[in-house]
Image (cartoon, helix red, strand yellow):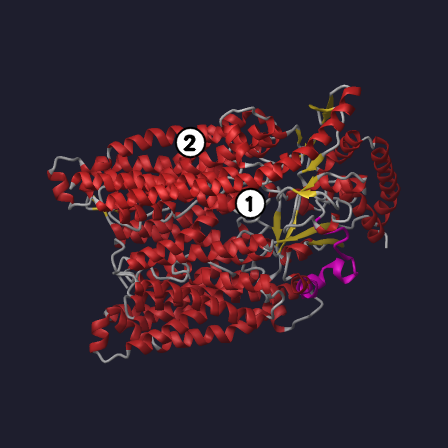
Amino acid sequence: MRKEQFGHFLTLMLIFIGLTFVAFYFHITNGAFDMSVMDVVKTMLRIDPNEKHDLVIFEFRLPRIVIAALVGIGLGMAGTVIQGVTRNGLADPGILGINAGAGASIVIFMFFFQMSSNNLTDDSWSSILMMPLFGFVGGAVAAGLIYLFSWRNGVLDMQRLILTGIAISSGFGALSLYISLKMNASDYEMAAVWIAGSIYSANWSFVLSMLPWIVILGYVIYRKSHLLDYFQLEEASAKSLGISVEKEKSILLLSSVGIVSACVSVSGGIGFIGLMAPHIAKRLVGIQHRFVLPMSAMIGMFLLIFSDYIAKTVFEPSELPVGIVVSIIGIPYFLYLLVKSKA
Amino acid sequence: MTMRKYWFIGASALLALTLAACGDQEREATAKEEKTEEVADVEQEAKTEVKEEAATEQTITYLGEDYVLPAQVNNIVAASLESMEDAAILGVKPVGVLEIAGEIPGYLAKELEGASLVGDKFAPNNESILALDPDVILGSSKHGEDVVSSLNKIQTMIPYSHISTNWKENLRLLGQLTGKDAEAENIITDYDAKASEAKGKIQESLKDKSVLVVRIRQGSMCVYPAGVYLNPVIYEDLGVTIPEVITKTEAQAELSLEALAEINPDYIFLQFETSENTDNATALDDLLNNPIFKSVEAAKNNHVFVNAVDPLAQGGTAWSKVKFLDAAIEDLLK
Amino acid sequence: MNKTNLIATTILVTSPVFIVLAIVLSVLYGAKDISALTVWQAITQFDANNVDHNIIRTSRLPRVIAALLVGAFLAVAGSVMQGITRNYLASPSIMGINDGSAFVITLAMVFFPGLPNYQMILLSMVGSAIGAGLVFGFGSLIKGGLSPVRLAIIGTVIGTFLSSIASAVAMYFQVSQSVSVWYNAKIHTVNPDMLVLSIPFGLVGLILALSIAKSVTISSLGEDIAVNLGQRTKWVKAISILSVVCLTGTAVALVGKIAFVGLVIPHITRFIVGVDYRFVIPCSAVIGAVFLAFCDVISRFINFPFETPVGVVTAIIGVPFFLYLIRTRGGEQRA
C-alpha cells in the first residue's frame, strides 16, 4: 500500500517534470530574437558558441525561467504550509496579507533608495540583495499582526485569521499606494508594474538574492513537512504525540513568510499560485504532506514558467505582467476544482 | 500495478510527442535561419570593411561619464521617448523605437517611419533590441538598475537624461553619434536666440502674471516642479515668475479644480493625452465647460491653450522645447 | 431591546446634525480660502460670475453630496448582503461586485468610447449583477460555498479574475491612463451631471433595502426560521440582490471602487444598534454617509493643497477600527 502510493507520487512527479520541461522548451525557444531550436541546443551545449546567442539564452531567457521556477516553487511550498498550519484549504499568502505586507515595505524601500540612488548608482548590487530582507520585515510584520489579532485562547481562530488578513492586506495596500504617490512619476509607474507582478527584467543577481531563502527555508519546511499532517488532527492529539505545536507552527509559518517575501521582492505580487498549487497537489497525491509539499512546489513551478511564457509572447514585443496571466488562467481552473469537489 | 503502467505509458507518449514537435520546428527554423544568415553575412562584411579603415572604437563623453562605442555608429536603438523625439527633430532614423499600443507613437510616426518596435517604455524587449544589432542604445535615465544592466549587456547603453536642463547635452550627443553636430548646434542657437529675444518682451507684458502648465493624467490635473516637464521653457527660458504652487510641488502632484481656482493663473497650457484616452472628447469638454474652470482668469481671457504641443511630448527634449517655445511665444504674446 | 431601540432612534434623530456638520465642514474647507459669508451667498444668491460661488456650487457641494450618497449606498449594500447571506464578510468589495462593475466599465470604455453618463450607470449595474451572479453562483455550486470564509475567498478570487482581465484589456488598448480612474476612487472629480442622474437609481436601491429590512432580520436568523415564519425567501433574496446591484452599481459609476465602507460600516452599526435590520439599515446609511464625507474632508488636507485618493484615508481609518473590532468582538458570526 505504502509503496504503491509512493509509486503513484513518483509517476505524477515525472509527469509534471515532463510538463515543466515542455513549458521550459517553449519558453527558451521562443522570443523576439530569432533563434532556431538547433541554435538554442548548441548554445546550451557550448558547441561553437556565438556571443549573441549566449546573451539571449544565458542572460535573458534562462534567468527569467529560473526566477519563474524559483518563485513558483517558493509560492507553492509557502501556500502548502500556510494551508496546513491554518487548517484551511483556502488560505493563501495573498489573502492573508503577507504579500501586501512584504510589498508595502519593498515600496518603502524603493522610495528611499530611489531618492538616494541618483548619486550612487554602483550600489545596485547591495540594493538587490537587500530587497528580500526588507520584504521579510514587512511580511513578518504582517504575519505578526495576523497572529496578534487572530490568537484566541491559545489557538489561531480561523474566522479572525481571514478577517485580519483582509484588513491587513487592504491596509498595506493603501500604504503602498500612498507612498507610491509620493514617488516621482517614473518610479511610480515602475512601482505599479511591479505591484502587478512581473519578472521580465530578471537577471542572475535576482536569482542569487532569492536562492538562499528558497533553499534554506525550503529545506527547513521539507524536514518538518510530516508535522503538517499532525496539525490536521485535533490540537489535543497532536500535543499528546509530544509535539510542541505552537512552536513548530511558528517556525513553519515564519519560514514560509521568508520564502514569500523573497518571491515578492523579485516578482511583485503574484497571487493565487500559493492557493492553487497545493489544491491541485492534494487532489493528485492525497493529503500526506510528505508528498503534497514537493508536488505543490512542482506544480507551482510549472504554472509560473508556463504563465511567464504566455506573458512574454501575447503582446510581443511588449510584456504583460505575469501576475495577470496567472490569475486569468489559474482562476477558472481553481473554480472548476472547487465545483468538482462537490461530487 | 496496471495504474502505474498506464501512467508510464502516458508520460513516455508525452515525451515522444514533444520530441516530434521539436523535430518539426527545427527543420522549419533552420531553413529560415540559413536565409537570414546569408543576409547577415553580407552586412557583416560591409561593416567590417568600414571598420578597418578607422579606429574600431570611440569614446563619447556625456554628462561627465565616458561611454565606449563602435567608431561607426549605424544602428541606433532609441529605447526612450526622449531620444525618439530628439531623433525626430535631428532627422536621425533609429532602427528600433518604443511602441505605444503596438505602434510608433502617432506624433513621431512620420519621422521615425520604418523603425522596428522594441517594446514599451517600462520594459524594452531585450531580445528585439539585440536582434537589431545596435551600435548604441539610447535608454533613459528613468530606467531601473535591472533594465540598465540588461541593456548594457547587448551594447553600450547611454542613459538619455529625462531632466529638461540637460536637453542641450542630449541633442549634442545625438549629433555627435550621427555626425550631425552642426545641425544640433544650429537647433540650439536658434532656440536660444528665439528665447532671449522673446524673454524681454514676455517679461514686460507678463509682469505679475502667472502661467501654469497642467497635464491631465488619469483624469486629474497634474502639475510639476519648475525644472520638470515643459516648465523650464516658461519659467527659465522665457523668465516668467514661478507661481508659489509650483515651488511647493515635489514630483507630480494632483490639483483639484478648487486649488486651480485658488492659484487663479492668467495663462494655462493644458496638455491632454488624447491618444491615451478613449473617453477624451467628453472629459476635455467637461473640464473646459466647468464653471469653476471657466471662472479662472486664464479661461475668462481666452488664455487656455490646449495641447500647444502634442500631448505625448515628454517636455524636456529638444523636440518638445523647440515646438513648445514657438507655441508659447505665440500664445503668450497674443 | 429597548435600549438598542433608543440608541438607534438617537442616531437617526441626530443624524441630520452630523450630516449637516459634514456638509458644512466640507463646504467650508478646501484648497481655496472661502469665507463662510461667501459660502452662504453662494447658496442663497448665486452669482455665476463669482469664482468662489462656482466652487461651492459645482465642486464642494457635489463632492460632499457624492461622498454622503456613496457612503450610504455602500454601507446599506453591505448591510443587506451581510444580513441576507448571514455572512459577516459579505460586502460589495469582497464579493467581487465592485470588480464586476469596474470590469464592465473598462470594456465599455475600450469598445464603445464616449457613452453617455446614464448608460455608464446602467452598465455599471449590469457589471455588479454579473459580479454578484458569478460569486453567488459559484458559492451555491460549491459544497459549503456560502459559508462566510469560503464565499469571501470565492469573491476575492473572482474579483481578481475580473480585474485581471480588465487590466489586460486596458493594457492592450493602452487605455490604462483613463481606466485607472475607476480603480483609484476619486470623489473630487465627481461629475455633477452624473450625480444628478445617479440619485434616482440609488434611491430605488435604498427604498428596496428599507422595504425588506424586516425580512432581512428574519433571514439573518436562519433559512429554516425564515421559512417557518412564513417568509417568501426567494422574493426577499431577489429584492435584496436587486437593491445591492442598484446601490453598488451607482456607487462605482460615480466614484470608482472604494473598499472598506461596505464591509466595516455594517459591522460598526450592528455593534452599536444590535441586529434588528429595521435599525441597522437606516443607521448604517447614516454612519456610512458621514464616515465617507469626513474621509473626503481629510483627504484634502493630507497633502495640502494637492489631493490624496480617498481610498487611502478610508483604509487608514477603517483598518485599525476593523482590527479593534476583531480583537474585542472576536469576529464571531454576528450577522
Q: Is residue C170 left or right of residue C149?
A: right
**Protein chain holding label 2:** A
Residue C162 lies in the magenta stretch? no
Q: Is residue C54 left or right of residue C266?
A: right
Q: Which region shows up in magenta? A: B285-312
Q: Position of residue A281 (x, y in %)?
A: 30, 45
Crowd rating for badge 1 (residues with CA inside 10 Å; few <14, some 14–19, many 20+): many
Q: Is residue A85 above or below residue B263?
A: above
Residue type, mark 2 in image: Met
At horizontal 61% and vertical 27% (from top left) the residue drawn is: A119
Residue A319 is labelled as 1
Quarter of the image where the C terminus of chain C is located? bottom left
Mark 1–mark 2 CB contact (< 8 Å) = no
Residue B310 lies in the magenta stretch? yes
The picture quadrant where one finds residue C97 is bottom left
The one nearer the camera, A282 or C115, is A282
The picture quadrant where one finds residue A247 is top left
Q: Is residue C17 visible?
A: no
Q: Earlier in the sequence, mark 1 or mark 2?
A: 2
Front tag of 1 and 2 = 1
**Protein chain holding label 1:** A
Between the C-alphas of marks 1 and 2, the distance is: 23 Å
Crowd rating for badge 2 (residues with CA inside 10 Å; few <14, some 14–19, many 20+): many
Residue bearing the label numbered 2: A210
At horizontal 67% and vertical 36% (from top left) the residue drawn is: B132
The one nearer the camera, C133 or C21, is C133
Q: Position of residue C296 (x, y in %)?
A: 51, 57
